[in-house]
Amino acid sequence: MSAASDRPLWERDGADWPHREASRFVAASGLTWHVQEMGEAQAPALLLLHGTGAATHSWRGLMPLLAEKFRVIAPDLPGHGFTDPLPAGRLSLPGMGSAIRDLLGALAIAPDLVVGHSAGAAIGVRLCLDGAVTPRLLVALNGALTPFPGLASVLFPSLARMLFLNPITPKVFSWTADRPAVERLIRGTGSRLDPEGLDFYRRLFRRPGHVAGTLGMMANWDLAGLSRDIPGLQVPTLLVVGSDDRAVSPETAFTLRDRLPDARVELLRNLGHLAHEEAPDRIARVILEAALAPA
């Protein structure tokens, strides 16, 4: 586990954080969490779960649009951004879900909607399968809900685990995380972000503790187990897919739709893996139309 000094610091790295006025720190599940909240307190609650390597900055464009109709709650996931990391023994997907459940309990929130991006969608599914939340709609934005195809399903988690166990890896990555390197990484997902968006990722990737949190998340998850359980998902599910996503193949959403009892796919052209950062207005429109449609 990284030293506290290796992690992003709120006073330094969060000085100009998007929607800083919406931030607070909450103790739950043995961690101190960075949480952002927007919208009317009496409105239905909507939980936002970001993906691997990101933080609440990822929702900077989308969150205010959703807050027009919902009370929106967005935490930094454990080990990401300004939230404490989980101990190694709790880094599994169920362990992450359990920590989120404890956070929701501390906030006294039962989300009406759950929206997760990439790995955040996997957490949302796990929460629903385990009965920790019972939303009336689950939205997966380019959800990472199935194992990598073929040999990659074995090699990638093993490689991530090996890198996670090497304490030098996060430091080496952070040393090389300059603007061009981060831009190449983001473009590799099929997305193009503005300079501000790239700078927030660069800022986080420059902190070895954040990198360690990202590697730990990838190294300890069993997506094969989630894939086996997912046909039992009873929550209506909207699978939002960017046609240019290079991180999660858009085709997997259509295959997954046929395995779920109540799911549909919304394909958005010319958007990549970070579609919600590229075009928050389009993503908000899709979510709100689905959420506010007559039953």
Image (cartoon, rainbow, N blue to C red):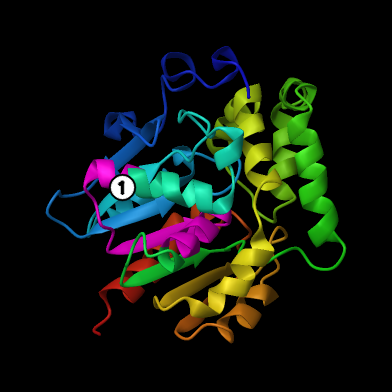
Left or right for 236, reference 210: left
Q: What residue do we see at 25% from left, 85% from top?
A: 295
Q: How many marks?
A: 1
Q: Where residue 230 appears, x then y in whole percent? A: 55, 74
Q: Is residue 247 visible?
A: yes
Segment tinted magenta in the rendering: 103-127
Q: What residue do we see at 62% from left, 43% from top?
A: 217
Left or right for 275, reference 244: left
Q: Where residue 291 appears, x then y in whole percent? A: 31, 72
- Foreground of the two, 149 or 230: 230
Q: Which residue is mark 1?
A: 104
Image-quadrant location for residue 28: top left
Image-quadrant location for residue 170: top right
Please rate how many residues cluster around mark 1, counting C-alpha atoms within 10 Å: few if below 14, some from 14 to 19, many from 20: some
Q: Is residue 270 visible?
A: no
Q: Is residue 78 above or below residue 247?
A: above
Q: Where residue 79 appears, x then y in whole percent? A: 54, 33
The reply to whether the magenta stretch includes residue 204 is no
Q: What residue do we see at 61% from left, 78% from top?
A: 256
Q: Quadrant of the N terminus?
A: top right
Callout 1, which amino acid?
Leu
Outermost left residue: 42
Q: Secondary structure at mark 1?
A: helix
- Foreground of the two, 86 or 286: 86
Q: Where residue 188 appears, x then y in whole percent? A: 75, 50
Q: Is residue 46 above or below residue 138?
A: above
Q: Is residue 181 above or below residue 15?
A: below
The reply to whether the magenta stretch includes residue 105 is yes
Q: What residue do we see at 48% from left, 64% from top?
A: 125
Q: Is residue 173 above or below residue 249?
A: above
